[in-house]
Image: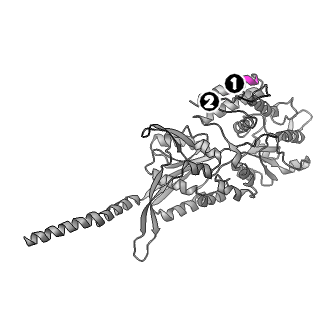
Amino acid sequence: MFKFKKLFIFSLLSALILTSGLGCQSSEDAKIKEATKPITLVYWRVFDGKDAFDDIINAYRASHPFINFEYRKLRYEEYEQELLEAFAEDRGPDIFSIHNTWVNAYKSKITPVPAKITMAYQTSSGGFGQAAEVSLKEKSSISLKQLRDNFPDIIAKDIVLTDYDENIKKNVQNIYGLPLSLDTMVMFYNRDLLNAAKIPQAPANWRDFQQAVAKLTKQDKDGNLIQSGTALGTSNNVERSFDIVSLLMMQNGTKMTDEKGSISFDKMPTGLSGRSVPPGQEALIFYTDFASPSKEVYSWNESMQNNLTAFTQGKVAFFFGYSYHIPTIRANAPKLNLGIAKMPQIEGAPEINYANYWFEVISKKSPNQAAAWDFVQFATDAAQVSKYLNKAKRPAALRSLIATQIDDLDMGTFAAQTLTAESWYRGNNSTGAEDAFASMISSVVNKEVEIKDAIDLAARRVANTLR
């Protein structure tokens, strides 16, 4: 009987020890073991090579050595097709970039940031035969307030989407991506051409810009353009004509979409008094005048070469583009006396600039969503993203980094425009919208239809891309 009691007491004590201490420890160990299983995050982007991310990846792996990366840079021309084929065959990347106008088109393929993420962190590497110290930590993800506090207003407009939550039976707003940088359109100019024309400064408003263009444009005795003040007015040979015309419309007071998200750039905005012509039409007339031989600002036409090529050859004084154009300009024209100025504005009107940039997003099919989102939030933090910005030579997206770039010879102009940047297209087919604008511009230049009919048709075509 005594032996039975001792055995019973020993068993009871053992059970208590296991459930109160050792059992919990084993459960924690099991969780850490699961969380530290080696995984590989596949990351696809355009424009930047892996070297732009080496420092960030190495810093991340210092705390997460069990996470490896497979980085792939694709050409822009092949990127979207490669993405769609990869997703169709379940071999797509965990992390990839999408343009700010692609967000709604890709919504079904990406997943929003989770409220919290639990990750394993290696706090010491061990040594002399000792095991590395690893712990599990739960962190809150970026909130809507933090997104709006930390980034320019346009970011939330583009990447925060509304979803219906079945659990709480109401709509909620979710963050579907984060940017590494934010590009805006600027005015590049040939300093030598402006100096020769005795124009001391790049024009800050469109009235002065028109005057400068007229002064800088030269024709031969037969009326052929031999030097262009600018390369505007057409669509087939003008880089990002969609962005330029969109910006002119927005600066002129056009409401590109109404409160319901319907296309309205062809209409007269409510409350806009003193105008007989909708501001969108005025902007289109202003733009196409540069390709009209009967206008004083005539400086470009459809028979001319690509405007970026002409600019690098010294044949164009003003070229509108983005930071990603700088390497091309410098490579093709190393001796060009390049100037970078802010986009001209309408005198007396609020400053509006145009945003053209990319987001880092996470695939809905990724088996490693938590780790992928953890890395993206790590990479877009100020301390880490600075490494990318410095290597890739890109303008910052974080408010806290804008001041650090203001005095930079190349990035300063972009930094100065970041907080006033806007965009508008959030449909399902940005290529279709751009094609509609290209046809609109071409039909006006070639006098195929009246300008009102051209813009009305473009509005209907763009509206079809929203469905």
> How would you rate the neighbour count of disc 1 (Cα within 10 Å): few for under 14, some for 14-19, many for 20 or more?
some
Q: Inspect this view and state whether residue 336 appears.
A: no
Q: Inspect this view and state whether residue 270 appears.
A: yes
Mark 1 element type: helix
The answer to if 201 sits in the magenta stretch is no
- Which residue type does callout 2 highlight? Ser
Q: How many marks?
A: 2
Above or below, comparing residue 428 to residue 357 in the picture: above
From the viewer's perspective, is 198 left or right of 235?
Answer: right
Mark 2 element type: loop
Residue 144, percent across and down? 56, 48
Which residue is pictured at 58% across the width and 51% down the height?
Answer: 146
Above or below, comparing residue 366 to residue 125 in the picture: above
What residue does disc 2 label?
262
The magenta stretch is 450-458
- Which residue type does callout 1 highlight? Asp
Name the one closer to the observer, 320 or 256.
256
> How would you rate the neighbour count of disc 2 (Cα within 10 Å): few for under 14, some for 14-19, many for 20 or more?
few
Q: Main secondary structure of the magenta part?
A: helix
Which residue is pictured at 53% across the width and 39% down the height?
Answer: 162
Name the one closer to the observer, 192 or 251.
251
What residue does disc 1 label?
456
Residue 412, percent across and down? 74, 54
Image quadrant holding the C terminus, namely: top right
In the image, farthest residue toward the bottom: 128
From the viewer's perspective, is 35 left or right of 421?
Answer: left
Which residue is pictured at 73% across the width and 51% down the height?
Answer: 416
In front: mark 1 or mark 2? Answer: 2
Image quadrant holding the N terminus, namely: bottom left
Residue 288, percent across and down? 78, 32
